[in-house]
Amino acid sequence: MRRYLGKTLASVAALAALVVLLFPLYAVIIGSFETNSQLIAASHYNFFPPSWTLANYTAVLSAQGGHVLSSLVIGLGTTILTLVISLPAAHALARYRFRVTGLLVGGRGGRGTRALSCHRHLSAVLLRTGPARAPGSRSGRRG
C-alpha cells in the first residue's frame, strides 16, 4: 500500500512540476493569438482569449518572411545533410566490427573505452549496492 501511495504522490508531484514548467510556454502561445489591446487591457490572465486572431502572425511573416524562409531552408538542409552522413555511419558501426568500434560506441575494448563509458561503471556500482536508504531502514534484500 505504501509503495502505491508513494508512486501516486511522485506522479502527482511530477505532473505539478510539468505544469509549472510548461505554463510559460502555454502563456506565450495563447498570448500570440490575442491582440495587443487584449494583452494590455486584461486585468487578469485569460486562459482562453475571448477572440482569436492571426494578426500577429501575419504581421511577423509580412515583415520577416524572407528571414523565416531562409532559416527554414538552412535548418532543413542541415538536417538532411546530417542524416545523409550519419545514417550510413551508424549502420556501419552497428553492423560491422572495426578496431575503433568499441572506442566510439563504448563497448568492451581498451583503456580509452573506460573513460568514454564511465556511466556503465556507475550504473554497475548502483546495481550492486542498491539505492541509498535512510539509516536503520530495511534494505528489502533477503539473505
Image (cartoon, rainbow, N blue to C red):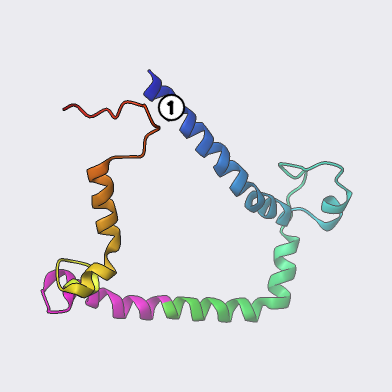
Q: Is residue 105 above or below residue 25?
A: below
Which quadrant of the figure has residue 113?
Answer: bottom left
- The residue depicted at 22 percent of the width and 44 percent of the height is 128
Of the residues shown, which amino acid type is indicated by label 1? Gly
Residue 88: percent from left, percent from top? 23, 77
Q: Which residue is mark 1?
A: 6
- The residue depicted at 49 percent of the width and 76 percent of the height is 75
Residue 134 as seen in the image, left or right of residue 22: left
Stretch in magenta: 79-101
Residue 35: percent from left, percent from top? 80, 55
Q: Outermost residue toward the front?
A: 136
Residue 119: percent from left, percent from top? 30, 59
- The residue depicted at 36 percent of the width and 26 percent of the height is 137
- The residue depicted at 51 percent of the width and 39 percent of the height is 14
Residue 30 as seen in the image, left or right of residue 75: right
Query: Which SS class for mark 1?
Result: helix
Q: Quadrant of the C terminus?
A: top left
Residue 52: percent from left, percent from top? 73, 50
Q: Outermost residue toward the top?
A: 1
